[in-house]
Amino acid sequence: MSNPEDLRGQKFGKRTVFAAAASRNGRGRWKVRCDCGRVDEVFGTELRAGRALMCRPCALDERRAALAQSIAGQVFGLRTVIGASRRKSRGFMFITVRCQCGFESDVRSDFLFSGQANACVSCTNSTYRKPRTPKFVAENAHV
Ligand SMILES: [Zn+2]
Ligand SMILES: [Zn+2]
């Protein structure tokens, strides 16, 4: 009968325990490899409690994906949210959006939410940056 304390070979969420690590404060720690390949050391108690089931970057990805999922279909200006982008940049989340002209791009979520990314560049140029001259002035200029 194998030692129930020995977690080697067991899988918790995305993480597989592959070796024992030095214990800390008398609590057993284990080396785990996430599905993404990242290796961390975690407490066995955390694993057994159903926490720490993936590495931090993966947890962040999941949160981002969940957020993108929750706003899928929402419209920001001319753009409609399609879903989470795979693009990553330190500290920023990117969301894939489709402009009404059909152009798809990844935009920073903070730009999207603040209204700074409401259209693709060409639509921004043609829709949001019309000449400031009021229309009636231009129309009546030749009179
Ligand atoms: Zn991971
Ligand atoms: Zn566009």
Image: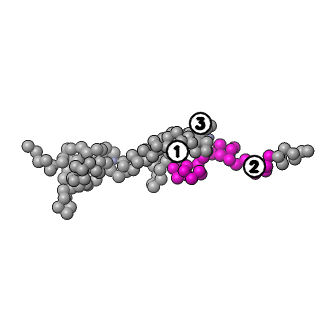
Which amino acid type corresponds to the residue marked 2 in the rendered image?
A: Pro
Residues shaded magenta: 108-135
Task: From the image, tell me which residue sits under label 2.
Answer: 131
Q: Is mark 2 on a helix, strand or loop?
A: loop
Q: Where is residue 67 in the image (x, y as percent from the top left)?
A: 45, 46
User: Marks 3 and 1, how far apart in space?
Assistant: 13 Å
Q: Residue at x 79, y 50 (%)?
A: 133
- Residue 15 shown left or right of residue 76 in the figure: left
User: Marks 1 and 2, how far apart in space?
Assistant: 28 Å
Q: What element carries label 3?
A: loop
- Residue closer to the observer: 65 or 123: 65
Mark 1 and 2 residues: CB-CB less than 8 Å, in contact?
no
Q: Position of residue 140 (x, y in %)?
A: 87, 45
Task: From this view, report whether residue 27 is shown above or below residue 83.
Answer: below
Which amino acid type corresponds to the residue marked 3 in the rendered image?
A: Gly
Residue 123 colored magenta? yes
